[in-house]
Amino acid sequence: MYTLLIVQLAVSGALMGMVYALIAYGFQLTFATSKSINFGQGELVMLSALFSLTLIDSGLPYWLVVPGGMLFGVILGLFVERAAVRLSLEQKGEGWILLTIILGLLGFSAAENIWGRDDRPFPTPIPSDPLHFFGIDVTPLELSVAIGVLTVMGLVELFKRKTLLGKAFEAVSADRDAAQLMGISATRTIQLSYGLSGLVAAMAGILVAPITTVGPTMASVLILKAFSVAVVAGLDSGFGVVLIGLFLGALESLTSFYLGSGWREAPGLVLLILALAVRPNGVFGKASIRKV
Amino acid sequence: MLTVENLHAGYGTSEVLVDISLEVKAGSVVALIGANGAGKTTTMRAISGMLKPNRGRVLLDGRLVQEFDASRIARLGLAHSPEGRKVFGPLSVEDNLLLGAYSRLPRFFGFRARAAADLEGVYALFPRLKERRLQAAGTLSGGEQQMLAIGRALMSKPKVMLLDEPSMGLAPIIVQEVFSTIRRLKETGITLLLVEQFAKSALEVADYAYVMDRGRIVIEGTPAHLREDERVLAAYLG
């Protein structure tokens, strides 16, 4: 019975960890093409979720809310690239770090003013009555998170491998100068990567919202864990973030059971510190991360 | 086909290229030779847009391109096979070749079918690449990577091809192979600007040649003419 409880905790935690993996995957997409990431990605997740909530409140059916929210994420991602990243990359500077943080803060203020400070429930048609698998309870809601994450990541990976535009994306990641010589515009490709990054972040927000509720602070903890997952896995392994995401989710769930829920955030930070000290390229990483 | 007029370029405040003028006529092979650090690679980079020239003009098929971004110049028909080959290591040989034709293929689907004939053409020229078509380009030997870099440049069906140091770091026997490839390409009527340290081999395939020294073009002429020039003999043909 006791073993079953541990497995139950690990499975529930791991399914939540998939959300970390998806956000971390968004970091990888922009890092691959531009060696930059959006430090305001958490606010992007949150704004997309709040926007989706507004779509629901306006009476739109759920199957239209999801693409609507994702489109909003794409637009935000493109905006971040244009407003905070492009110029500083052209000057080969690091200005994007500060600029993306500032955009995130602006997004946070905007959310507080538009939607208020309260956390609100996010209605979903997906039932939360648990299903039983070999004595373990899994809610369809938790399952929808895992399925949603794997579907989105799978589609993006398929795009990268099967279309010429996707291969161009990989070419820019491998060697930006050489890609330009093939007629591939690096600027356009970086733009594309920010759009895709916004898309996966919005999807993460929509998937997690029914479980965590929605409000301006919903993503502040989430993003820290996603960042840990990205660094621990390495910023170039899509397979790695899923594994580390699952692992961290399970670990958090078990930690909060054994040590108390106040310790819930500890494993992510400990893993982050360990990774930076022992394997700064990440467990599955090849490329070196430039520390700034 | 390619005309460079009074080109000045450099990195930061230091000017590397001083008043470079050269011409590559359609269907001709032109060699750019000179010692290490003479500015040959910088000239190539300034032509293809990897480096913005400070002054001067670059005309590609009658069109001024010196203000354009490298990707736009590539789309206008210039294929630059850069120094160090720069193949896309994690991607397969075939994907590298397909990306060479990026500017004239559909972006999403059907690009493989559209490129099939040209792929076969490159594979006919380099049978070794066909054997390794699914292998990651980074795992190829230096000579194979050079063939891939040339093949990739050919895939775009360029108006002008720039080939930078194809012999760099290769064993002598492979260098010979590279030059026999260049000779075969010449027979097909390619327009080529070739940078080489092996001046002797370069002069054997070229129709015309420029000699660079410390960022300037110091001598130019036909290979027969250069071979008789004492300065060239002493400095480069030993």
Image: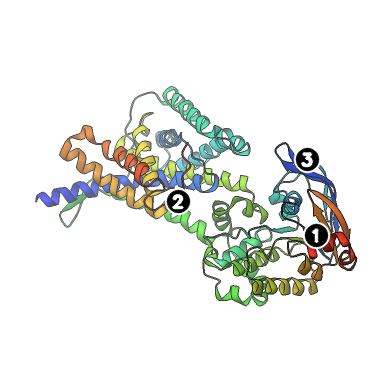
- Is the residue B162 above or below the residue B134 in the image? above
Q: Label 3: few (<14), some or many (≥20) within 10 Å?
A: some
Identify residue for label 3. B54
Q: Judging from the image, what secondary structure is the residue with disc 1 in?
A: helix
* Subunit that carries the residue with mark 1: B
- Is the residue A165 above or below the residue A115 in the image? below
Residue A156, given in percent of the width and then of the height, sits at 47, 53
Q: Label 1: few (<14), some or many (≥20) within 10 Å?
A: few
Q: Amino acid at mark 3?
A: Asn
* Subunit that carries the residue with mark 2: A
Q: Residue at x 71, y 46 (%)?
A: B51
Identify residue for label 1. B235
Give the left or right position of residue A139, taking residue B197 as reference.
left
Q: Residue at x 68, y 64 (%)?
A: B166
The reply to whether residue A127 is visible in this rendering is: no
Identify residue for label 2. A236
Q: Amino acid at mark 2?
A: Asp
Q: Let me know if marks 3 and 1 both belong to one chain.
A: yes
Q: Amino acid at mark 1?
A: Ala
Toward the left, the furthest residue is: A1
